[in-house]
Amino acid sequence: MLFGFFEFVILLIKPIRRLRVILVRLVQFLGCFSLGEFFTDRLRRVHDTASDIFNWDGEVTDIAIEQG
């Protein structure tokens, strides 16, 4: 349930690239904890997916249009 909440929060901030980067770095900093590695991996995957969908200006890319 806790992990679902974090995924929801991540989805809310997906378009805000700087916030995502800050969160990824924060979780990487917390990587010494066992959950830190899990969150780092999840955030990195969400961040990579969001990078494919949104460009720097927050506009939808061709990849997102192709995927529907």
Image: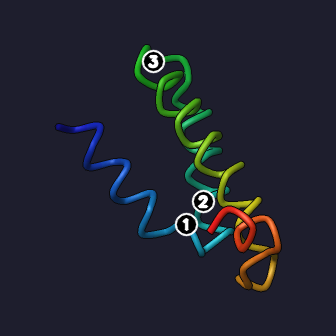
Give the residue type that dot 1 points to. Answer: Lys
Q: Nearer the viewer, mark 3 or mark 1?
A: 1
* Residue contact at pointers 1 and 2, CB within 8 angstroms: yes
Quadrant of the image occupied by residue 34 = top left
Judge the density around disc 1: few (<14), some (14-19), many (≥20) Cα neighbours within 10 Å.
many
Judge the density around disc 2: few (<14), some (14-19), many (≥20) Cα neighbours within 10 Å.
many
Rounded to the nearest angstrom, the CA distance separating label 3 from label 2 is: 20 Å
Q: Quadrant of the N terminus?
A: top left
Residue 49 vs 15, above or below: the answer is: above
* Residue contact at pointers 3 and 1, CB within 8 angstroms: no
Q: Nearer the viewer, residue 19 or 62?
A: 62
The residue beneath circle 2 is 20
Q: Position of residue 19 (x, y in %)?
A: 59, 66
The residue beneath circle 1 is 14
Left or right of residue 20, residue 38 in this image: left
Rounded to the nearest angstrom, the CA distance separating label 1 from label 2 is: 7 Å
